Amino acid sequence: MKEISKTPEKISGMFNEIAADYDKNNNIISLGFHSFIKQIAVKELAPKYNDTVLDLCCGTGDICEILKKYVNPKNIIGIDFSSEMLRIARQKHPSLNFIQSDISSLPQEISNIDKITICFGLRNVENRAKVLEQVYRVLKPGGFVLHLDFGRKNLFSKMFDLFVSLFVKVMHKNSTPYSYLINSKNQYPEPDDLAKEFEFANLKFFKRKDFVFGVISMQIYKKI
Ligand SMILES: C[S@@+](CC[C@H](N)C(=O)[O-])C[C@H]1O[C@@H](n2cnc3c(N)ncnc32)[C@H](O)[C@@H]1O
C-alpha cells in the first residue's frame, strides 16, 4: 500500500472540513463506543486534581471533557492545529485553555507537564519521532503519557473498515476523510511495534489495555 501523505496542510485542512460533523459521525461509526473507551483510558491514567495535563490533538475536546472530572480545569491545556476543531472545542469548553499548534513543535514555554494524553492523534502526524521528542521534552521526570488509537489489524478491524465504507455510501458522505481513516489505521504500527518507538524516545512502557478485540488499544508510558 502506498504511504499516505500527512503534510500539516493536508491534515489540518481535512479536519477543518469535517469539524462541524466530527462529533456526530464519530458517534455513528464507533456505535457510541469511543466515548466509553475514552472514559476508561483516562481513568487508567489516574489524573490528580493538581496535575497539569496536556491533551495533544485535542480535536473538539472529548478528552479534555473527561479530564475535567478529575483535574482542576485551570491546569488542562488542549492543543491542536485545526482552527475549526478548536473553534468547536472552545465553544464546548469555554473554561479550558486551548492552543493552536502543530504538536511536532510545541511552544517553548510548555514544560513541566505531569500527564499527557494523545488519542486518535499520533496516527495523523508526519513524523512520530519528532512528536515523541516533544512529549519527552515537556513531561516532568516521572510523568506519564497516555496513547489511545487503533491497535491490532484482525478480522474485527476489517469489519470496522467495511462498516465505515457502508456508512459513507448510505450517508452520501465525501469519501476522502473516511478512506484516509481506513488507510491511516491500516498503515499505523500495531501496539507492540509502537511501544518500541516510545521506548526509543525514552518513554518506558508502563501499562496496556485493549478494547473491542484489540481493534482499539491504549498504552501508558512513563518518562524515567
Ligand atoms: C481524529 S481527531 C482526534 C480528536 C480527539 N483527540 C478525539 O479523540 O476525539 C485527530 C485530531 O488531531 C489533530 N492533529 C493531527 N495532526 C496534528 C498535528 N501534527 N498537530 C496538531 N494537531 C494535529 C487534528 O486536527 C484532529 O483534530
Image (tube, helix red, strand yellow):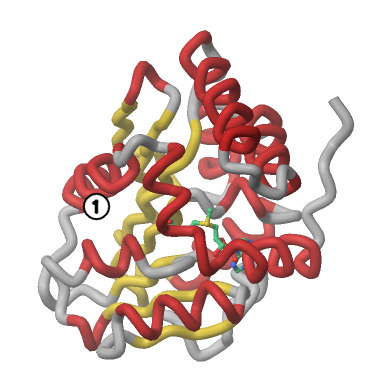
Q: Is residue 179 left or right of residue 197?
A: right
Q: Is residue 63 left or right of residue 82?
A: left
Which residue is drawn at the image coordinates 57% and 85% (left, top)?
A: 107
> Where's residue 100, x and y in %?
57, 83
**In this orientation, does residue 224 appear?**
no
Q: Quadrant of ligand 1?
A: bottom right
Q: Is residue 143 left or right of residue 134?
A: left
Toward the viewer: 153 or 21?
Answer: 21
Which residue is drawn at the image coordinates 64% and 70% (left, top)?
A: 16
Query: Is residue 34 depicted above or below 169 in this figure?
Result: below
> Where's residue 167, x and y in %?
55, 34
Which residue is drawn at the image coordinates 32% and 32% (left, top)?
A: 208
The count of marks equals 1
Q: Is residue 181 left or right of residue 163?
A: right
> Where's residue 171, x and y in %?
57, 42
Residue farthest to the right, as pictured: 2
Q: Identify residue type, mark 1.
A: Val
Q: Secondary structure at mark 1?
A: helix
> Where's residue 66, x and y in %?
22, 62
Quadrant showing the N terminus: top right
Query: Is residue 94 depicted above or below 123 in this figure?
Result: below
Residue farthest to the top, as pictured: 155
Quadrant showing the C terminus: bottom left
Which residue is drawn at the image coordinates 84% and 37% (left, top)?
A: 3
Query: Is residue 215 depicted above or below 177 in this figure?
Result: above
- Name the residue carrying label 1: 42
